Amino acid sequence: MNIRHLTALTALAGLAGLAAGGPAMAQTVDGSATIQATFRGGAEPACRLNTPTAPTAQNVQIGGLAPGSADISISQLVGDDGAPLAATVVLVVPAVCNQAHTLNLSSLNGGLLGDGPELTGGPFRSRLPYSVTVAWAGGQQSFVTQDEALSFAVGDAAVGSVTVTIEIPPGGAPLAAGAYSDEIVLELGAAG
Amino acid sequence: MTASPALVHGWKVAALVVSMACIAAPAWAQDQATVTLTGEADQMCTVGQPTQSIGALTNFDTPSGSVFGITRLADPETLSTQAATITLSMDAMCNTIHRVVIASDNNGLWRQGVTTAPSGFGSAVPYTANLVWADQQYPLTAEAASRRTVEEEMLIGHPNTGEMLIEFEINTGATNAGLGAPLLAGEYSDVLRVTVESQ
């Protein structure tokens, strides 16, 4: 009888030693033990624009295409009569937004703006408005650069290409001599 | 008659010798005492809580309990999966032949909330969890093709004790929408369970 008690005590002490000697053990009396490990991570809301291509270019020269920028020069801005000539360029910008987002597009100068004095009357112009059409995520919108900006919301994540079509209309009042320039800013922003 | 006392005396002496012999007998093999010792070792398996082991560690935060957080699940440029690697260690023991099961609750790291993703986006991240035990390797592939429980089971034909490892690995660009697809913004998670069970 005493020997049996001693044996039982020894076994219990052995278990206590296991429990105290290392990390907490998951152990059950039926010989089965289970542990779990949770793995988790977050994907932050974000939008990215990559290097554009210019599959269509009429009367323009593509100077440089890089992630986040494109330099476009109009080959011949005006004709012999001083009136603007038509020019078109289509930019295809690979883009991705991983949640609902907003696309914004704006013209810094409200059109191609000459580097001379700004003319508000008379036979010559110092600013040449043009149109921009944006297609993205199954939607399409256009605006003319004298409007303030273009903006539309996309209610879900989207991946693909933003197609930006820039069209300079021919004709109209002649342009005053000078160098004309504008900067178009295309912005994709994740909501929230 | 004079001899009789002597005879009687002699008999008494002889009787005494026999008596002494009877008393002394147990000390030199004419009787037995048997002591039986019995005991039973129950079938038992133990496994400790997982901790970060030495070895490859990429893109994981400092562990908090049994939660292992990936520092940056999505690459900030591609928005697709960024590689992550960690090795977990558990002290384990089974004193008989036993079964080991490694199971994933979700078959990948799945995004919480929306179950359908817009075309082109990943909403789950596949991974592999390689269980190392008893000098063998047992890989579990959570391929994230569908959200379900998956498990791998192996029978170990002998008792074993020592360190059990889980080598957890996420590959660059791995998503359920194809290699390099962007991940939908959100929180992703899965639970791995390891069971050791005597047979």
Image: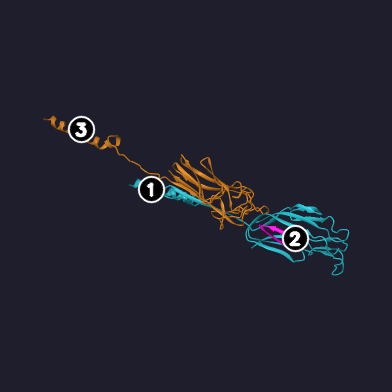
Question: In the rendered view of the protein, which quadrant contains the N terminus of chain B?
Answer: top left
Relative to residue A126, is residue B67 depicted above or below? above
Q: Which chain is cyan?
A: A
Q: Which chain is orange?
A: B
The residue wearing badge 1 is A8
State the residue lying farthest toward the bottom.
Answer: A121
Q: Where residue B193 sits: x, y (%)?
A: 50, 50
Residue at 52%, 45% (x, y): give it: B164
The kind of secondary structure element at disc 1 is helix
- Cα gap from disc 3 to disc 2, whole angstroms: 138 Å
Of badges 2 and 1, nearer the viewer stands 2
Of badges 3 and 2, nearer the viewer stands 2
- Foreground residue, A81 or B194? A81
- Cα gap from disc 2 to disc 1, whole angstroms: 87 Å
Q: Crowding near pointer 3: few (<14 within 10 Å), some, many (20+)?
A: few
Chain identity of mark 2: A
Residue at 43%, 49% (x, y): give it: A13
Q: Amino acid at mark 3?
A: Ala
The residue wearing badge 2 is A132
Magenta residue span: A133-144
Name the mark on residue B14: 3
The kind of secondary structure element at disc 3 is helix
Which secondary structure dominates the residues rendered in magenta? strand
The kind of secondary structure element at disc 2 is strand
Q: Amino acid at mark 1?
A: Ala
